[in-house]
Amino acid sequence: MDRSSKADPQSAQTQDILELSPQESYHTHKEALRDIVANDHFGGGEEQVPEEIVDQWVAVMEPGSKIPLPNNIRGFYGGSLKASIPIEVARGSYKHIIYESVDKEKVNKYARRMLIALSVLNVDVLVEEEPVLGATALWHKALAQVRLRDCNGSLGVTLQQYGAVRPKVNLKDFKMPQPTRLKTRLMSVAQELDEYATLDTLNAWLPNS
């Protein structure tokens, strides 16, 4: 049976996702995370992915989990595998809407799923301990928030955080966008979705760019 029959991440209110602590969000959205891992990351329900595999991924995503992970596998840009897993799961949701601008319901659904996956990360701590992963998480958070009308205010905060941490990351622009290129990309998305308030937020960030 497809796990989407057991959980409806689309029903999660965006403010609720953003206001919960990582631990609170994990327990609140645990069934939603199972659905996202099974269907967005692995691409199918239990017919394609054994339930125990999905459960292992969800268990590893719990904040503070001490489940051993392979020592020979690194995360994004050589960073922590544990912190990279929620980002990788969010990318699974992102692929459904990367080029979508017509079906607003679909955009809202998968952008919220991205935020649910990322919500188990303590980004404030991550930007201090692993700036490259903190910046990666903020980058993907912005890619979700720009698509959600009720995230306009929180998008501004995310952009300020990204602008502060990106200079600490020694990666080329093509691997992780500099703030000016990210702004251009996000403005293109907001224009395609007719999100005029979001455009105002983006114009207020880096006003001289």
Image (cartoon, rainbow, N blue to C red):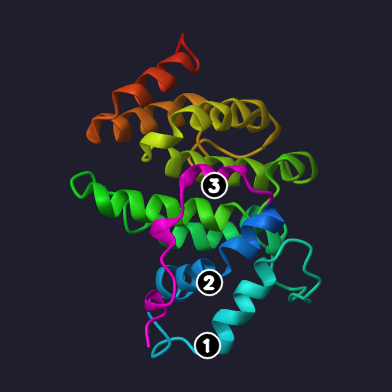
Circle 3 is placed at which residue position? 16
Please, is residue 83 above or below residue 46 in the view?
Answer: above
Q: Secondary structure at mark 3?
A: helix
Of pointers 3 and 1, the one earlier in the residue sequence: 3
Asked whether the beta carbons under mark 2 and mark 3 sit within 8 Å of each other, the answer is: no
Q: Residue furthest left?
A: 102
Location of residue 188 in the rendering, given as x and y in whole percent from the top left corner: 30, 31
Q: Residue at x 36, y 58 (%)?
A: 95
Considering the numbered disc 1 on the image, is that residue within a helix, a strand or a loop?
A: helix
State the CA–CA distance, disc 1 to disc 2. 12 Å
Q: Which residue is mark 1?
A: 51
Q: Position of residue 167 (x, y in %)?
A: 66, 28
Point out the image quarter for the C terminus: top left
Magenta range: 1-21
Q: Could you tell me if the residues under marks 3 and 1 are in contact, i.e. CB atoms within 8 Å?
A: no
- On the question of residue 78 being in view, the answer is no
Look at discs 1 and 2 and give the one toward the viewer: 2
Graded by Cα atoms within 10 Å as few (under 14), some (14 to 19) or many (20 or more), the crowding at tag 1 reads some
Q: The N terminus lies in which quarter of the figure?
A: bottom left
The answer to whether residue 113 is seen in the rendering is yes
Q: What residue type is disc 1 on?
A: Glu
Q: Which residue is mark 2?
A: 31
